[in-house]
């Protein structure tokens, strides 16, 4: 109640300012509307390539050119959803020259890697004891998983290659940040196997 009372009083001067400004006339002529500034291409726009979209501003892919072919990765959690999110390189650790992150020049991207978890199998349950409530357990259920990996050109949405990678992990983590008392954790895409598959397309 006290917090709302404070906010209410803080809003009064703003309201008075609006009223005063609304009552003031202006003798200056109306200025023409400014031309909208064209927004630069961002890495997040490439998500639509995994859904048969295209990016005209991207760099065309030409395997014959002996240089790195920059890519960006997106992942979705199962075939029942058509929503992808950008996948970080922190865990898979692909060579840095391959990756264009959110600070990079998105127009240099030639390839989009679309990763979908297509199956999972239960491995075991990990138990974490609550430090503040003795006897209370937080449960993390581990799953092995299989991932479909597709490599698509950024400009034409042409699929260059596809494979399935199996991920296995039966080790309970030392720490886990829970938002619910029971959560699922899926084995992550194996970085070594992913790099081996993508080398044909990304490496000079």
Image (cartoon, rainbow, N blue to C red):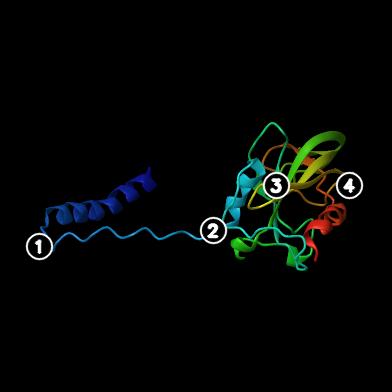
Label pair 4/1, CB-CB below 8 angstroms: no
Q: Nearer the viewer, residue 144 or 113?
A: 113
Q: Earlier in the sequence, mark 1 or mark 3?
A: 1
**Label 4 neighbourhood size at 10 Å, few (<14), some (14-19), many (20+)?**
few
Residue 53 falls left or right of residue 72 = left
Q: Earlier in the sequence, mark 4 or mark 3?
A: 3
Residue at (30, 60) in percent of width and height: 34
Q: Nearer the viewer, mark 4 or mark 1?
A: 1
Q: Secondary structure at mark 1?
A: loop
Position of residue 204 relative to residue 190, above or below, is: below
Q: Which mark is residue 41?
A: 2
**Quadrant into which the N terminus falls:** top left
Q: Earlier in the sequence, mark 4 or mark 2?
A: 2
- The image shows residue 68 at horizontal and vertical percentages of 75, 66
According to the image, label 4 marks what residue? Answer: 171
Between marks 4 and 1, how big is the CA–CA gap?
Answer: 73 Å
Q: Earlier in the sequence, mark 2 or mark 1?
A: 1
Q: Secondary structure at mark 3?
A: loop
According to the image, label 3 marks what residue? Answer: 158
- The image shows residue 136 at horizontal and vertical percentages of 76, 38
Label pair 1/3, CB-CB below 8 angstroms: no
Q: Secondary structure at mark 4?
A: loop
According to the image, label 1 marks what residue? Answer: 27
Residue at (63, 63) in percent of width and height: 108
Between marks 2 and 1, how big is the CA–CA gap?
Answer: 40 Å
């Amino acid at each position: 109640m006290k917090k709302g009372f404070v906010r209410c009083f803080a809003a009064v001067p703003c309201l008075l300012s609006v009223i005063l400004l609304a009552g003031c006339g202006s003798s200056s002529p109306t200025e023409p509307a400014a031309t909208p500034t064209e927004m630069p291409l961002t890495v997040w726009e490439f998500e639509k390539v995994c859904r048969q979209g295209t990016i005209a501003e991207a760099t065309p892919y030409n395997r014959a050119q002996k240089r790195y072919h920059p890519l960006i990765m997106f992942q979705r959690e199962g075939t029942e959803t058509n929503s992808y999110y950008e996948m970080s390189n922190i865990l898979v650790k692909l060579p840095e020259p391959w990756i264009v992150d959110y600070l990079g020049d998105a127009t240099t991207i030639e390839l989009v890697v679309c990763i979908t978890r297509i199956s999972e199998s239960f491995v075991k349950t990990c138990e974490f004891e609550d430090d503040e409530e003795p006897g209370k357990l937080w449960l993390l259920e581990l799953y092995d998983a299989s991932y479909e990996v597709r490599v698509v050109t950024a400009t034409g949405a042409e699929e260059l290659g596809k494979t399935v990678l199996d991920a296995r992990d039966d080790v309970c983590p030392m720490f886990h940040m829970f938002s619910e008392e029971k959560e699922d954790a899926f084995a992550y895409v194996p970085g070594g196997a992913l790099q081996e598959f993508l080398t044909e397309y990304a490496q000079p």
